């Protein structure tokens, strides 16, 4: 019997050891895909930037505008992971005082009760506390992070209530700039099982949370360190994502709507709450609520709806204080006679509220950065975002100007003062000046590659072959897995060929193009051409892929190669190769003989949804969608 048990333990140990690499890969993939690290422990030492080796952050710009907050004449708002602080002393001319780049996409911003710091729910970056006593030199003074993405933070005296959908609510005590975790188990307040906190707020006696599983949850805070469940209101077929409190009134809104948005109003009485009224807003979807005295401001997809709740049993829409928007409002804050908002199309807006909402100032940012490229002759940086096309420079990425609007933009490239822009269903050519001007467009609804320059034209590849902004289609009606070029040389990887065809002119037919054989049964995931060399990734997206280098002109029996941790996106410049691996952005160097790994950055720490990468000299440009554009310097 003992021998059998010992053999079983040995077998189990062998299985665990054998599969440890696969388990580790599964954990890494989970973190990369979802942003959650299942092995993480609570920590008060969260890095402010993604951990990197031999990569130095040289600039950041843009990202999804989201949270905002007001205090006196200060406005704080976010562009992706970057926090901005503005002076609103002159409402018509807001002035930026300072900014600081954090780790994750900022979900919520609150001023501390004394106004000396900002409490930031930084998503995967955890809770961050930023000292604003010197607005021109913002300084991070405390952090707290765990497995879940922190989405909400609320302060009561020296206590901070932190909420995330994975870990529920946690309570921290702040003493000066030191944080201590209170031993509080939120599970005891969830008799119905799992919980998904949508938002939290509090008054003098209650801590209120909206729970997308269990509905409205009320907790008495006679002892603020140990809130006690006192009541709940389940809401069938409703996700109560947004909650706001003021005195004895609680408002609830849901993101799960069909034809109308319902706002439910509760009155806190005794140890619980009673529903006092509800009001429906036709054709409207809320993104949040702000409650100010006898008015509630519901902001969402069509602007701001003001509700007069002087009589809570008979709420009514106050059209005088409403404001319509062509783009959804994502964040909204009020202070006295002024307000601010952020929008999905990348605008930070300042309102005056003395009579009715009046827009006094608007600042536009690259929102949801999808692509970026550099004109190597002029050094000008072009940024393609959901909110339009912007121009900047590598010497100062933060200074930018908007060149124009492009609908459904997905990627952008520049060559000879012309921009090639791929949209959802076309490849477009634009002339660059103080504004951009469309020259032509080619319909191509099923393109998958980014545009590449070739002999004064741009080409794009995908399921329908290769299309050109000129007149020639090289591989019409044929599936193309990858396409790359440097302006003089073009390579294509037709689907099913497991190799490359190389073109030096537009007259060569596919049957006559030089063919470079690659490994059978392996897909070519991406490729780049630079100085007569082709760099390409072969394998499967989640496998141990390989990076190869082949010369455009020379034939070699054995190609230099490097094993990768997955991969599917690649760019190269002067022997430096930047590519996306699972959980990392990695940089390699090819010296003419072998490939060496020289630098890397953990993209899971953000997590960073990479939509495009380009290189210019020793700089790597990473378009991180909602997190904006990152520029990293490779330190060799």
Image (tube, rainbow, N blue to C red):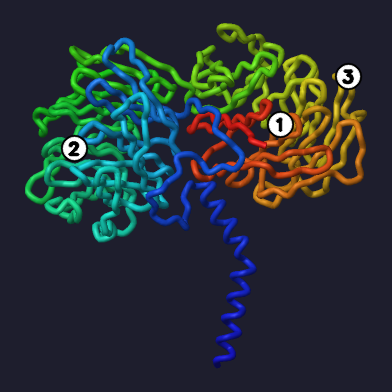
On residue 577, the disc is none
Is disc 3 surrounded by few (<14), some (14 to 19) or many (20+) residues within 10 Å?
Answer: few
Q: Is residue 238 above or below residue 510?
A: below
> Looking at the image, is mark 3 or mark 1 earlier in the sequence?
1
Question: How far from the left and from the top, in percent, is residue 111?
Answer: 26, 33
Residue 342 visible in the snapshot: no
Is disc 1 surrounded by few (<14), some (14 to 19) or many (20+) residues within 10 Å?
Answer: many
> Looking at the image, is mark 2 or mark 3 earlier in the sequence?
2
SS state under label 2 = strand
Residue placed at 81% from the left, 42% from the top?
Answer: 498
Residue 431 visible in the snapshot: yes
| Residue ranking furthest to the top | 434
Q: Which residue is mark 2?
A: 245
Of badges 2 and 1, nearer the viewer stands 2
Is disc 2 surrounded by few (<14), some (14 to 19) or many (20+) residues within 10 Å?
Answer: many
SS state under label 3 = loop
Number of marks drawn: 3
Of badges 2 and 3, nearer the viewer stands 2
Q: Which residue is mark 3?
A: 507
Q: Is residue 502 left or right of residue 21?
A: right
**Closer-to-camera residue (116/400):** 116
Q: Is residue 407 left or right of residue 316?
A: right
Task: Classify the position of the N terminus by image quarter.
Answer: bottom right
> Looking at the image, is mark 2 or mark 1 earlier in the sequence?
2
Q: Is residue 236 left or right of residue 42?
A: left
Q: Which residue is mark 1?
A: 462
Residue placed at 54% from the left, 38% from the top?
Answer: 609
- Cα separation, mark 2 vs mark 3, equals 70 Å
């Amino acid at each position: 019997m003992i021998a059998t048990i010992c053999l079983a333990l040995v077998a189990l140990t062998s299985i665990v050891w054998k599969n440890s690499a696969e388990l580790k890969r599964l954990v890494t993939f989970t973190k990369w895909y979802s942003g959650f690290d299942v092995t993480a422990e609570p920590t008060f030492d969260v890095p402010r930037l993604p951990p990197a080796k031999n990569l130095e952050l040289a600039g950041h710009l843009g990202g999804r505008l989201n949270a905002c907050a007001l205090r006196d004449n200060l406005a704080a708002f976010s562009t992706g992971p970057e926090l901005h602080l503005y002076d609103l002393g002159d409402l018509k001319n807001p002035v930026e005082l300072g900014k600081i780049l954090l780790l994750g996409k900022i979900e919520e911003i609150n001023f501390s009760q004394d106004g000396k710091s900002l409490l930031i729910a930084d998503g995967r970056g955890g809770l961050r506390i930023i000292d604003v006593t010197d607005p021109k030199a913002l300084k991070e003074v405390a952090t707290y992070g765990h497995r879940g993405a922190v989405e909400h933070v609320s302060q009561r005296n020296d206590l901070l209530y932190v909420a995330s959908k994975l870990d529920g609510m946690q309570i921290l005590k702040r003493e000066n700039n030191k944080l201590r975790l209170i031993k509080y188990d939120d599970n005891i307040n969830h008799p119905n099982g799992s919980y998904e906190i949508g938002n939290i707020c509090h008054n003098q006696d209650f801590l209120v949370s909206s729970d997308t599983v269990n509905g409205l949850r009320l907790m008495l805070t006679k002892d603020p360190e140990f809130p006690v469940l006192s009541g709940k209101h389940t809401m069938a077929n409703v996700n109560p994502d947004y909650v706001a409190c003021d005195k004895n009134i609680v408002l609830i809104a849901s993101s799960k709507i069909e034809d109308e948005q319902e706002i439910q109003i509760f009155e806190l009485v005794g140890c619980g709450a009673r529903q006092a009224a509800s009001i429906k807003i036709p054709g409207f979807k809320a993104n949040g609520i702000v409650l100010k005295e006898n008015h509630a401001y519901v902001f969402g997809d069509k602007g701001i709806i003001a509700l007069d709740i002087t009589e809570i049993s008979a709420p009514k829409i106050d059209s005088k204080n409403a404001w319509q928007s062509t783009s959804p409002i994502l964040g909204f804050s009020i202070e006295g006679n002024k307000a601010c908002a952020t929008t999905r199309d990348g605008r930070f807006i300042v309102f005056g509220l003395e009579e009715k909402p009046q827009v006094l100032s608007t600042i536009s940012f690259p929102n949801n950065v999808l692509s970026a490229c550099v004109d190597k002759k002029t050094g000008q940086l072009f940024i393609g975002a959901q909110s339009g096309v912007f121009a900047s420079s590598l010497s100062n990425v933060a200074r930018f100007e908007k060149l124009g609007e492009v609908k459904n933009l997905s990627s952008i490239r520049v060559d000879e003062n012309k921009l090639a822009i791929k949209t959802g269903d076309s490849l477009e050519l634009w002339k660059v000046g103080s504004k951009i001007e469309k020259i032509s467009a080619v319909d191509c609804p099923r393109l998958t590659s980014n545009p590449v320059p070739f002999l004064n034209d741009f080409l794009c590849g995908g399921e329908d072959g290769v299309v050109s902004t000129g007149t020639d289609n090289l591989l019409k009606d044929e599936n193309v897995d990858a396409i790359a070029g440097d302006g003089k040389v073009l390579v294509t990887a037709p689907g099913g060929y497991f190799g490359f065809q190389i073109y030096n002119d537009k007259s060569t037919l596919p049957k006559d193009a030089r063919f470079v054989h690659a490994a059978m049964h392996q897909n070519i995931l991406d490729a780049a051409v630079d100085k007569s060399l082709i760099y390409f990734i072969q394998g499967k997206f989640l496998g141990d892929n390989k990076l190869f280098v082949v010369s455009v002109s020379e034939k070699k029996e054995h190609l230099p190669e490097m094993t990768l941790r997955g991969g599917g996106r690649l760019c190269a410049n002067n022997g430096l190769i930047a590519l996306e691996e699972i959980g990392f952005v990695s940089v390699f160097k090819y010296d003419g003989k072998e490939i060496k790994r020289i630098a890397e950055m953990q993209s899971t720490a953000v997590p960073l949804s990479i939509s495009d990468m380009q290189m210019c000299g020793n700089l790597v440009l990473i378009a991180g969608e909602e997190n904006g554009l990152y520029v990293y310097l490779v330190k060799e």
